[in-house]
Amino acid sequence: MVDFIGTRRVQELVRDLGPAPFIAGLAREIEADYRRWSEFEKSPRHATHSPLGVIELMPACDGRQYAFKYVNGHPKNTAKGLLTVMAFGMLADVDTGYPLALAEMTLNTALRTAATSIVAARALARPDSRVMALIGNGSQSEFQAIAFHDQLGVRELRLYDVDPHATDKLLANLGGLALAGLRVVRCRSAAEACAGADIITTITADKRNAIILTPEMILPGMHLNAVGGDCPGKTELHPDILRRPDARVVVEFEAQSRIEGEIQQMPADFPVSELSQVLTGAAAGRSGERDVTIFDSVGFALEDFSALRYVYRLHRERRGTRASIDLIPDLEDPKDLYGLIATPRVVRERVAELAEA
């Protein structure tokens, strides 16, 4: 039997720990894995595109455990009452190839995206950053708000979304959380949200080359957490922002980001650093207060590996609902797979025939 970590179990684990401590623990896990970057077998995700969206497979392996995630991105799904992004994943043992757990990754993807944003922002944002613009108030926005308030000390959140109902939803959820000392401001435009911000998080859903941020919105010293651009033909930043002489662009996995990130707009030799290099000191992050740092985040399989291992460990350690799924045959004789479908009578009769022959 294989452990099954479904949506209800993840809900239980997050509620038990609390969203902010859960994200903080996951951020530690992700950072530790990025710091051992060389141990991982890495590749860009495999993407199957259609006119309405994309389906992707995201594998990662550190030689001991293997993980993959199946994830979609279909921006028009909400009109059908469906999620824009849905995912599930598996963690397996490399030595046997046997799966350890099958897990939901829809909620987990939002949690790990926020956790990764925090890992990057700790390395790139100014330590005194207290105001964040959050542009795109959809399904991942609460996780980003909670993470930056708890882990980075953000005290003012400036919100904007082209859909006012999305902002209504975010305001209601943040009000219910009662985050101490957090001031929330509803803005009428992306430019208004960015005014006075130290950090700008963009996390929009439309699959197109949008210009959410323009050069005049960006001031020296800002940190841009560009999360929404995550597939070919989907960007959020004007390319001149990337070209700024004071800009430092950091990506997760360069080979993937060249295809899917904001840097898909730039020539192949456009200089970037990988997050692992910044975390280990192999590449510079922010060198001064006036640098504009840009985390061009598309989501990488290592983060899902970290999330699957983290939730699997919590699932094993903590009390609560435990479930398993008979995904793998359990055989008395590992060479007798047919025995699973042979009836006892057929088996007995065949044994008798062979004995008489």
Image (cartoon, helix red, strand yellow):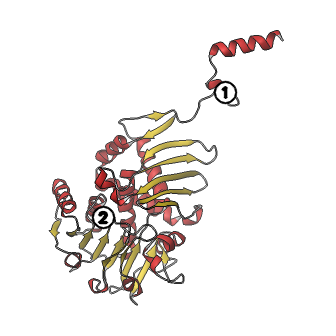
Looking at the image, is 248 positioned above or below residue 62?
below
The residue depicted at 32 percent of the width and 42 percent of the height is: 12
Name the side, left or right, on which 200 lies relative to 71.
Answer: left
| Residue at which label 2 appears | 151
Residue 53 location in percent, x, y? 42, 60
Of residues 185 and 238, which is closer to you in this image?
238
Q: Amino acid at mark 2?
A: Gln
The disc at residue 338 is 1
Residue 252 image offset from top left, x and y in percent:
47, 69
Q: Is residue 100 above or below residue 270?
A: above
> Vertical placement of 70 versus 254: above or below?
above
Residue 77 visible in rendering: yes
How many numbered markers are drawn?
2
Question: Residue 203's spot in the image, x, y percent?
Answer: 32, 67
Judge whether 103 appears above or below 183 on screen.
above
Query: Which mark is on residue 326?
Result: none
Q: Residue 119 in the image: x percent, y percent?
A: 39, 66
What is the CA distance from the residue labelled 1 to the residue labelled 2? 54 Å
Sort mark 2 into few (<14), some (14-19) or many (20+) by Cα contacts within 10 Å: some
- At x 31%, y 85%, the residue is 215
- Kind of element beneath mark 2: helix
Q: Residues within 10 Å of mark 1 (few under 14, many from 20)?
A: few
